[in-house]
Amino acid sequence: MNGIERARFWYDIYGRDMLAGEFGHAVGRIAVGIAGSGSECFGFDDEISTDHDYGTGFSLWITAEDDRESGLELRRKCQQLFRKLKSELPETGHSDGGRISDGVMQIGEFYRRHLGIAGVPENWQQWLMIPEYAFAEAVNGEVFRDDAGIFSAIRNGIKYGMPEDIRLKKLSYHAIMMAQSGQYNYSRCLKHGEYGAAGLALAEFVRHAGALVFILNHTFAPYYKWMFRAMKQLPVLPELSVMLAELLCSSSDGEKKCEAVDRIASVCINELVRQDLTRFHGDYLEPYARELLECISNRELRQLHIMDSGGSF
């Protein structure tokens, strides 16, 4: 079982009865699940993942009022349960970190820990400034129970609530950076004999292409080490995971890699056009980036420099 499956199993077999029996007065307001940082929250964990900072158990997200009334006892009971289960099932992890100590958290504190704010962004500046990997951590995993719906309302507001203007700005930014790093600077660095710089340019192209694919899917790119794996699960352009990895890792010469850069750019252009976000302008990404920027309704956002990411990437 991966971390998400194990957390659900532990909740179904042990946690559900413990909460109902000892915290029945509050159980209808307690959200249960697994989410946050760590490979186990994305479902990407394996044996190697257990060597550090590997969470065991499940998470409980509670209101501030319930925390004042019963949070201390709830934490004590959860820690006892998780340690007992871990001692009986040592293969589930080798670290005392993660949810052994953080099994119970106030709802607002969970989102503040990942986003710097206690809920859904309230303005375009927050949507733009918060890193995309932070949004991914706030909405990954799975919620097993949330009768009151408080935790899930925030989660869904983040997951499905990105304003279209922000989406356009992010697409514009990643597209211009793909053009600048991959379609322009990579070949020029090779011609100058600056092979280290060429490698950096290629890595930048891959990084921004990956992020663009997630935004085209109306979702957020996770931390870079999980980007390729997560991309394979997307409904739109999952094939770019393999293409980008091969571009980055293959021993092909510079000319063939330039051709691969253009193929990847063409795939992204076709999807931008298919989603009716822009018209066809040829094979170079810069005109698409500029048209996307001009489609933004918010004047302040539209007037930001095309290469301004807002610090969110």
Image: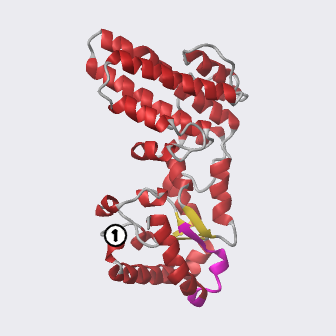
Q: Give the range drawn in magenta.
A: 21-33
Q: Is residue 28 magenta?
A: yes
Is 75 displayed left or right of 170 in the figure?
A: left
Choose top left, top right, bottom left or bottom right for residue 246. Answer: top left
Which residue lies most toward the top here? 191
Q: Residue at x 50, y 75 (%)?
A: 9
Residue 92: percent from left, percent from top: 36, 72
Seen from the viewer's position, the closer of residues 196 and 128 is 196
- What amino acid type is highlighted by mark number 1? Gly
Choose top left, top right, bottom left or bottom right for residue 82. Answer: bottom left
Residue 199: percent from left, percent from top: 32, 24
Is 207 displayed left or right of 70 in the figure?
A: left
Seen from the viewer's position, the closer of residues 289 and 13 is 13
Seen from the viewer's position, the closer of residues 205 and 258 is 258
Q: Is residue 295 magenta?
A: no
Q: What element carries label 1?
A: loop
Residue 307 seen: no
Residue 236 seen: yes
Residue 245: percent from left, percent from top: 40, 35
Q: Which residue is drawn at 44% across and 64% down?
A: 2
Q: Which residue is drawn at 45% across and 43% down?
A: 227
Choose top left, top right, bottom left or bottom right for residue 194. Answer: top left
Q: What residue is pinned by disc 1?
A: 93
User: Quarter of the image containing the N terminus?
Assistant: bottom left
**Is 312 located above or below residue 110 in the figure?**
above
**Is 35 located above or below residue 66 in the figure?**
above
Residue 237: percent from left, percent from top: 56, 36
Q: Which residue is drawn at 44% across and 42% down?
A: 228
